[in-house]
C-alpha cells in the first residue's frame, strides 16, 4: 500500500477521516487519529471564522490600536521634526503645527514662527487641531502616563462596552477635552490624550455610580481624585482639557454604562457619544 501523494513510499497508516493511505509526511495529527493534508485543510475554519476567533481573543483591540497610533505619531513626528525635543518635552515645530490653542480656530489669521525662522500664517481655521492635538504629546513621561492609563481603562471598559461604543466614547471625550481647552486654557500650545483618557475615567466612574456603587470606595474613585488633584495643583497641566474630557465622558457613561433595568434603549448608547462629540465641536467653535 503506497502513499496517495508519494507512490514510491509505503503508507503505514490511513487518514482517519477519508481513509486515504498516507506516509508520515502526509499526515497531520488531529484530535482523534490523523488526517491527510486535504482533510486537515478542509477541517480548518474559513477566513471569516478565523478572524472572528482572533478578534475574540483581543478584548481591548481598540485600546491597543489607539496606543499604537499614539506611539507611532510620537515617533514619526519626532523623526520628522525634532526627536530630542519630542523626547524631552520641549515645544517643537510639530506642536506648533498640530497642537491646539484657541488662536488657531478663532477665524482670525495668526502668524507663528518655526525653529527654522520660517513664519507660518494660520488662517484661524485649523479645525483639524481639535483632533490632532489629542494624539500629540510632550515628552516620554507625558505619553507614557497617558498610554498606561489608556491600557488600564481599555482593558476594563472595552470588554464591557464593545469596540464601537468604546471608540465612540473615546472620540467624544477627546473632542470634549479640546472644547475645554478652548473654553478655559488661554495659554500655550496644548496637546495630549489626557482629555480622552479623563473621559474614559469619568465614563467608568459614572457607570459604577449608576450601578449603585459608591465610586469613591473603588480604585476608580481613588484614581479620579488623584488625577483631579494633579490637574489643579501641578503646573503645566491642561485644566480645560482634563475637565472637558471628564464632563464629556461622564455624560456618555451615564447612558452607555446604564444598567439593564434602567431601560435605556440600545440605539441611545450609540447615539449619545455621537451627540456629545457634535456638541463638543459646536462649543469649541462658538467659544473660539
Image: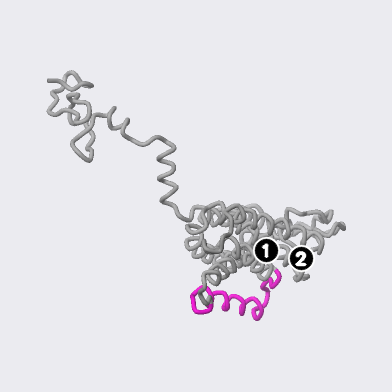
How many numbered tags mark residues here?
2
Q: Residues within 10 Å of mark 2 (few under 14, many from 20)?
A: many
Q: Are marks 2 and 1 in contact (CB under 8 Å)?
A: no
Residue at 22%, 41% in the rendered image: 31
Residue at 69%, 67% in the rendered image: 244
Q: Which sits in the foreground, 55 or 129?
A: 55
Q: CA distance from mark 2 to mark 1?
A: 12 Å
Q: Please provide the residue range marked out in magenta.
A: 216-240
Residue 112 in view, yes or no? no
Q: Which sits in the foreground, 136 or 203?
A: 203
* Residue 25 in the image: above or below residue 141: above
Horizontal and vertical percent for residue 236? 68, 74
On the rendered image, what quadrant is the N terminus found in?
top left
Horizontal and vertical percent for residue 186? 78, 70
As helix, strand or loop, the secondary structure at mark 1 comes to loop
Can you tell which mark lies on residue 213? Answer: none
**Badge 2 is on which residue?**
182
Label 2 vs 1, first from the N-terminus: 2
Horizontal and vertical percent for residue 199? 61, 65
**Badge 1 is on which residue?**
191
| For residue 155, side relative to residue 250 (left or right) | left
On the rendered image, what quadrant is the C terminus found in?
bottom right
Residue at 43%, 49% in the rendered image: 56
| For residue 97, side relative to residue 195 (left or right) | right
Residue 18 in view, yes or no? yes
Horizontal and vertical percent for residue 77? 64, 54
In this view, the mark in front (2 or 1)? 2
Amino acid at each position: 500500500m503506497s502513499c496517495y501523494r508519494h507512490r514510491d513510499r509505503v503508507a503505514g497508516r490511513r487518514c482517519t477521516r477519508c481513509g486515504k493511505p498516507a506516509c508520515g509526511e502526509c499526515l497531520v495529527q488531529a484530535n482523534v487519529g490523523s488526517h491527510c493534508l486535504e482533510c486537515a485543510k478542509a477541517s480548518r475554519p474559513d477566513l471569516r471564522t478565523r478572524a472572528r476567533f482572533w478578534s475574540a481573543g483581543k478584548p481591548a483591540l481598540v485600546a491597543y490600536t489607539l496606543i499604537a497610533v499614539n506611539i507611532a505619531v510620537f515617533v514619526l513626528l519626532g523623526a520628522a521634526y525634532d526627536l530630542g525635543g519630542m523626547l524631552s518635552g520641549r515645544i517643537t515645530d510639530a506642536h506648533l503645527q498640530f497642537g491646539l490653542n484657541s488662536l488657531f480656530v478663532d477665524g482670525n489669521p495668526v502668524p507663528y514662527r518655526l525653529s527654522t525662522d520660517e513664519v507660518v500664517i494660520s488662517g484661524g481655521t485649523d479645525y483639524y487641531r481639535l483632533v490632532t492635538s489629542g494624539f500629540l504629546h510632550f515628552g516620554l513621561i507625558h505619553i507614557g502616563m497617558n498610554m498606561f492609563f489608556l491600557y488600564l481603562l481599555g482593558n476594563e471598559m472595552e470588554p464591557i462596552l464593545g469596540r464601537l461604543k468604546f471608540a465612540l466614547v473615546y472620540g467624544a471625550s477627546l473632542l470634549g477635552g479640546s472644547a475645554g481647552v478652548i473654553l478655559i486654557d488661554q495659554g500655550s500650545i496644548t496637546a495630549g490624550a489626557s482629555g480622552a483618557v479623563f473621559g474614559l475615567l469619568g465614563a467608568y466612574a459614572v457607570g459604577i455610580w449608576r450601578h449603585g456603587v459608591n465610586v469613591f470606595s473603588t480604585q476608580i474613585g481613588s484614581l479620579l481624585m488623584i488625577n483631579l488633584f494633579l490637574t489643579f495643583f501641578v503646573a503645566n497641566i491642561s485644566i480645560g482639557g482634563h475637565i472637558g474630557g471628564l464632563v464629556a465622558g461622564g455624560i456618555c457613561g451615564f447612558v452607555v454604562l446604564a444598567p439593564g433595568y434602567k431601560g435605556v434603549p440600545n440605539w441611545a448608547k450609540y447615539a449619545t457619544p455621537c451627540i456629545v462629540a457634535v456638541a463638543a465641536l459646536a462649543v469649541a467653535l462658538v467659544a473660539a
